[in-house]
Image: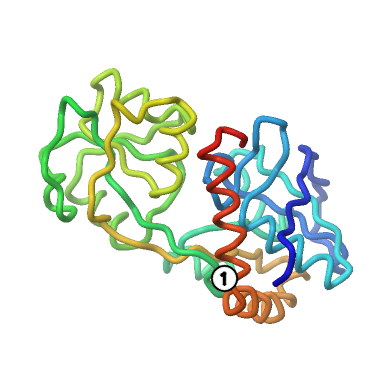
Amino acid sequence: MLSPAFAQYSSTKPTQTTSPKTICRTLAVGGANGWEPITYINNNGQHTGLAIDILQNYAERSDLRLDVNLDIPWTRAIQMLRNGELDVIAGAYFTNERDQIHFYSAPFAHDDIMVFQHRDNRFAVSDLHDLIGHRGARPQGGSYGDYIDRFAEQRLDMMFSPTGNRIFDVLMNGRVDYVMLGRFDGLSNIYRDKLSDDIKIVEPPVDSNDVRFMFSRKSPCMAHVKHLNLLIEELSEDGTLDFWTHNHLINLSDGES
């Protein structure tokens, strides 16, 4: 089994140019900070996560340099990807709209979309219809896939929280009845903020999404996607992806992130 690529990253600012580069020697990487175990900045200021492990492994094999910038706000990172100022977003759900603009890799992880509730305000949820009539919150700027996004826009009363890792604040202070987050993202916030007695996860998930790399169509590094897909398949088949994911989750549950 390949050893986990636990090389950590300090924050570096991307080189912003007026025109896209023409040769791929560096992968300029953006992503969501706080999306454990996919991408996050740990307590030491290091940029890490399963997606970074995969890109680091690929970069080492392909003689590329990584420039990882998880501290760029998500909305800004998406704009930079569209402009070719970033080569890849390290983890995103598939939507038809994004697929028209960007270029996706094969999936490297799966993320259950969960409802989280306060222990004193619980109600049964088996699918999205059970959320109608309740006020919810979700992170600003993100997508949960075409199905949830469309249903939420048409049928649900949801606020977009810009607070990132503090999204559970609006649930704790009673502003909303539930928060919608990825399973591991929500659980990592609960572990970190010691909220396990107050915030409860509701089973089953309301949906599950593949997690993929999302490349800029203006990036010369897009030519690497087919080889990256082969690496993802290899790391999945030999158990390396499961091993790396497990190690990130162990680090998070131990409070070492």
Residue extending furthest top?
173
* Residue 60 figure quarter: bottom right
> On screen, 71 above or below 56?
above
Considering depth in this image, is 27 or 97 the residue closer to the camera? 27
Q: Position of residue 43 (x, y in %)?
A: 66, 30
The residue drawn where x is 62% and y is 74% is 232
Classify the position of the C terminus by image quarter. top right
Position above or below: 70 against 109:
above
Residue 99 versus residue 124 in the image, above or below = below
| Residue 189, horizontal then vertical, whole percent | 45, 34
Visible residue check, residue 82: no
Front-most of residues 119 and 216: 119
Q: Secondary structure at mark 1?
A: strand
What residue would you read off at disc 1?
Answer: 104
Query: Where, quadrant-wise, is the N terminus in this rendering?
Result: bottom right
**As drawn, is 13 to the left or to the right of 33?**
right
Q: Quadrant of residue 69?
A: top right
Left or right side of 186 for 224: right
Along the line of sight, the residue nearer the viewer: 155 or 172? 172
Residue at 66% of width from left, 69% of height from top? 217
| Residue 33 image position (x, y, % from top left) | 59, 41
Residue 111 falls in image quadrant: bottom left
> Which residue corresponds to the image point at 86% horizontal and 65% vertical from the top-left?
64
Residue drawn 36% across the image and 36% down it:
160
Colour scheme employed for the rendering of this structure:
rainbow
Question: In the rendering, at what x and y percent does residue 226 appear?
Answer: 67, 81
Instruction: Report the label total.
Output: 1
Which amino acid lies under the numbered mark 1 shown in the image of this protein? Tyr
Q: Is residue 74 visible?
A: yes
Label 1: how many Cα within 10 Å (few below 14, some 14–19, many 20+): many
